[in-house]
Amino acid sequence: MKGMLSPSLMCADPLNLQADIETLDALGVEYIHLDFMDNKFVPNITLDTTLVKAVKGVLRNMKRDIHIMAYDPEQFFERMDIGSGDIVSVHYEACEDLHSVISAIRQTGASPFVAISPDTAPEVLKDYLSEVDGVVVMTVYPGFAGRPIVEGSFEKLAAVRKLLDSSGRKLILEVDGHVSWDLCQKMRQCGADLFVAGSSSIYAKGLDLKDSVPKMMALIQ
């Protein structure tokens, strides 16, 4: 599977979101990463459901990669207009009945992913590999951009890759957190397929997306 890019909209200039989305779309980026937080599961609020829904209306070729960092995530699905083509990631740590939440995502036509935070062991994923289309490994603690990578993240990515491959299904491994110029290739070597890029790379201060995005896309192939 080729490496794919999912730029994080929370790292973009909030006054130029639509222009950035249109630029990313024109550059051939596969996904746009949309972080939704409830200020409960993580102590922050970023993009609201109205904006997550609005993004759908301006995409031409890109698909939404929606990362829900919230308890009871099903309550937000309708407001985000979740449907075919979307990736929807929910946290193992935030769902009382994860099987039910995965099923609810599948019923919308979207692709269900399970996200795990840095302190969660890869082994918890075993019960869900037959139900999901991918897994998100958080290599920083969720909630804020620009955090340093957590120690042991590369070993964890490799362990999750091994688990996914053992399922016999073609599951996507997404990495979210400090996907930087100097670390992204090692993440790729550990088995990551989909890369959430933000302030550590394509949105770093002083860079133009028309230059930074092709550079990152080349590094993760």
Image: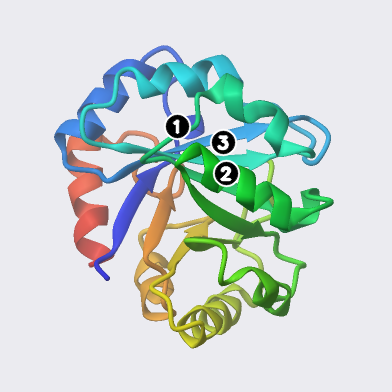
Residue 6 x %, y %:
37, 46
| Tag 1 secondary structure | helix
Q: Nearer the viewer, residue 197 or 162?
A: 162
In primary-sequence order, the first of circles 3 and 1 is: 1
Relative to residue 79, is residue 177 depicted above or below? below
- Is residue 73 visible from the viewing direction of this image? yes
Residue 106 x %, y %:
53, 47
Relative to residue 56, is residue 119 depicted above or below? below
Separation of marks 3 and 2 at Cα, in angstroms: 17 Å
User: Residue drawn 79% across and 49% down?
Assistant: 94
| C-beta proximity under 8 Å, tags 3 and 1 | yes
Amino acid beneath label 2: Ile
Q: Residue tagged by mark 3?
A: 35
Q: Residue tagged by mark 1?
A: 9
Residue 127 x %, y %:
69, 73
Res. 39 image quadrant? top right
Separation of marks 1 and 2 at Cα, in angstroms: 22 Å
- Is 194 on the left-hand or right-hand side of 175? left
Q: Residue tagged by mark 2?
A: 105
| C-beta proximity under 8 Å, tags 1 and 2 | no
Separation of marks 3 and 1 at Cα, in angstroms: 8 Å
Amino acid beneath label 3: Asp
- Is 144 on the left-hand or right-hand side of 24? right
